[in-house]
């Protein structure tokens, strides 16, 4: 997302085992909701239809009543995962066409402020595709890789988890099948390059695959990327989200390897769009939403509960 921060929910569909502490104790089969402060970057400015495609393309749900007399839905719970609960996204910098093009150049002080504010992870969006060759083996420019290394090291040196996010890959969004080999080639380089780094470095495969990316194609890309990554990073956490801009309604479409216990599933939730994206320059017609309020009425809260349930 350009132009500011947004509050998202990071859902870990792998939970922590109860033996010991730390993020190394994640096991499959439980769900945990983490509140994270992130900004999700739309790689495509034509997202005026996001509300319809991400949230409203499913059969309308019955909104549950406000009182507690209804049957209680009890979700699965996991022990607290130490080390990743509140994060900040250092956006508009390394995922811009060139760092500084969107008004942000990363500085050491940003990492100090992230630590001092009580965050425990930093998400670093990176436009790898804009700094790599178009032909195999899709070499990433050495000077750009060195700059990203600096950002990762600034994060890790402060005891923070670093989520290295592949961001702004417009070519993939437009032609996912045609770009699949390049996508895999980029992760082959990155997984080899970062193999020796701390386990507090996480990989995020791709930010917000759009509606141009079919679910089955994306699942194929996930499987192939994980195969490559696991050859050099067998225990590193990998963050994966669904298509439709990581939309909550598309979580069901994800197909993930059951035996991989180091996958974190994320979704991005922006409802109601008229409130969260009022005045957003990348959403057509959003100026007309200026002044929209979310006051926490019974209906407003019930709509959110219904989506999360």
Image (cartoon, helix red, strand yellow):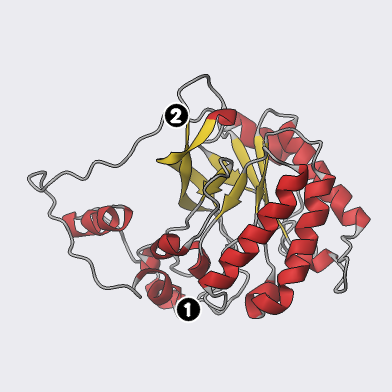
What number of labels is visible? Answer: 2
Residue 77 coordinates in the image, percent (x, y)? 35, 35
Residue 14 coordinates in the image, percent (x, y)? 48, 41
Per the rendering, the mark at residue 80 is: 2
Local SS, label 2: loop
**Pointers 1 and 2 in contact (CB under 8 A)?**
no
Q: In this orientation, does residue 143 appear?
A: yes
Q: Nearer the viewer, residue 122 or 248?
A: 248
The residue lying furthest to the top in this view is 20
Position of 266 with respect to 116 (left or right) is left
Position of 12 with respect to 209 (left or right) is left
Position of 57 with respect to 281 (left or right) is left
Residue drawn at (53%, 22%), measured in percent from left and top?
Answer: 21
Residue drawn at (49%, 44%), measured in percent from left and top?
Answer: 36
Using the image, determine if residue 158 lies above or below residue 58: above
Name the residue tied to disc 1.
Answer: 48
Residue drawn at (76%, 41%), measured in percent from left and top?
Answer: 152
């Amino acid at each position: 997302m350009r132009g500011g921060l947004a509050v998202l929910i990071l859902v870990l569909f792998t939970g922590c085992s109860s033996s010991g502490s730390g993020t190394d104790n994640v096991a499959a089969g439980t769900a945990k909701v983490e509140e994270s402060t992130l900004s999700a970057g739309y790689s495509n400015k034509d997202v005026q239809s996001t509300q319809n495609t991400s949230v409203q393309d499913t059969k309308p749900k019955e909104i549950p009543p406000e009182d507690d007399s209804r049957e209680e839905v009890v979700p699965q719970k996991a022990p607290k995962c130490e080390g990743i609960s509140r994060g900040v996204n250092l956006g508009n910098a390394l995922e811009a066409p060139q760092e500084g093009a969107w008004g942000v150049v990363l500085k050491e002080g940003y990492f100090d402020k992230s630590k001092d504010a009580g965050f425990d992870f930093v998400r670093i969006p990176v436009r790898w595709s804009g700094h790599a060759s178009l032909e195999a083996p899709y070499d990433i420019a050495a000077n750009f890789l060195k700059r990203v290394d600096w950002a990762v090291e600034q994060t890790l040196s402060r005891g923070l988890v670093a989520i290295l996010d592949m961001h702004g890959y417009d070519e993939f969004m437009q032609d996912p099948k045609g770009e699949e080999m390049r996508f895999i080639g980029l992760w082959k380089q990155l997984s080899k390059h970062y193999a020796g780094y701390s386990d507090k470095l996480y990989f995020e495969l791709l930010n917000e695959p759009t509606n141009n990316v079919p679910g089955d194609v994306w699942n194929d890309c996930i499987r192939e990327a994980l195969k490559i990554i696991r050859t050099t990073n067998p225990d590193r956490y990998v963050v994966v989200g669904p298509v439709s801009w990581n939309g909550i309604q598309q979580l069901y479409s994800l197909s993930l390897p059951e035996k991989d216990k180091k996958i974190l599933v994320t979704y991005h939730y922006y409802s109601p769009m008229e409130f969260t994206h009022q005045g957003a320059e990348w959403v057509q017609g959003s100026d007309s939403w200026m002044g929209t309020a979310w006051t926490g009425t019974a209906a407003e809260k019930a709509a959110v509960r219904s989506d999360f349930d």
